[in-house]
Amino acid sequence: MQKLLKNTFSSGLVILLTLFSYNSSQGTEISRQRQNAEIALISAKLQNTLNNNDKSAFYELIPKEIAKDIDQKYTEFITSFPNAKWLVTPGKDLKDNRHSIQILVKGDKETGTNKFSLQSKQRIAINLDNGRINKSEIISDYSILKSGNKKIKVTIGIPDSVLTGSTYDIDIILDKPLENSLIAGALMFIKNEKLNAKGDENIELNPMGSGGLFKSVRAPMKEGKQRWGALIAHSEGLISITKMVRVVSRQDDLIP
């Protein structure tokens, strides 16, 4: 059981968390109208690439050295979830005039007697240079990985952005409390070096209430990003969750 807990939790950490997060040189300015058309085209190309395992768009839209890394991460992910379905759509522009795209992926798999379902969503800010992505930043993301036959709905009550030094709540809510089930859970702060971990560390689970996992935490005093991981074990299976939180110093930056 402990090995299964580790593997399930670590799987939730590699949902392409850094797939399109990189920096390159800033390119030339082009018209907003043309950029909007290019964003729509880029979204369609990425969706087609991700759904059809045709990696050509990675190299067409992204610098070669970055595309190779993305190619590898994508291959590893598809090996775990070969039937994953992707939806890539243009998102709302940010206050600083950067464009954004949204990437949603869902997938299911069976391993022996274990059934898994995955959902992950990212909002990514991007800059363009002649139809290519030359700069990007993950603005928000989460992933939910479930095991077991029972469809248990979960609500992630974690803010996308918080102020430096503020206290905020981390709530993982089971929409329908499991009244008669034994439930245990764990919450952990994920450091950058653990994003590609293979699940070789112990995860200590503690008894929790039937309604979910609830905790208050304090944001650091410096701007940056925090990533949280949560694991809930119940009689029907496991739920693994990851969520990124942006830490900003100005009220105006809470909504990018």
Image (cartoon, rainbow, N blue to C red):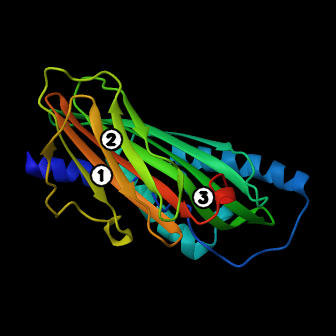
What's the residue at 50%, 50% (across, down)? 141
Neighbours of disc 3 within 10 Å: few (<14), some (14-19), many (20+) = few
Within the image, what quadrant is residue 76 found in? bottom left
What's the residue at 31%, 67% (across, down)? 194
Which mark is first along the chain, 1 or 2? 1
What's the residue at 63%, 72% (across, down)? 63
The picture places residue 72, in percent across and down from the top left corner, at: 43, 64
Disc 1 target residue? 11
Which mark is first along the chain, 3 or 2? 3
Residue 173 vs 192, above or below: the answer is above
Q: Left of 58 or right of it: where is 166?
A: left
Amino acid residing under circle 3? Ser
| Quadrant, the C terminus | bottom right
Disc 3 target residue? 56
Q: Left of 182 or right of it: where is 32?
A: right
Within the image, what quadrant is residue 228 found in? bottom left
| Quadrant, the N terminus | top left
Which mark is first along the chain, 1 or 3? 1
Callout 2 secondary element: strand
Q: How far apart are marks 3 and 1 (CA)?
A: 26 Å
Disc 2 target residue? 145
Residue 76 vs 112, above or below: the answer is below
The picture places residue 23, in percent across and down from the top left corner, at: 62, 74
The picture places residue 53, in percent across and down from the top left corner, at: 50, 49
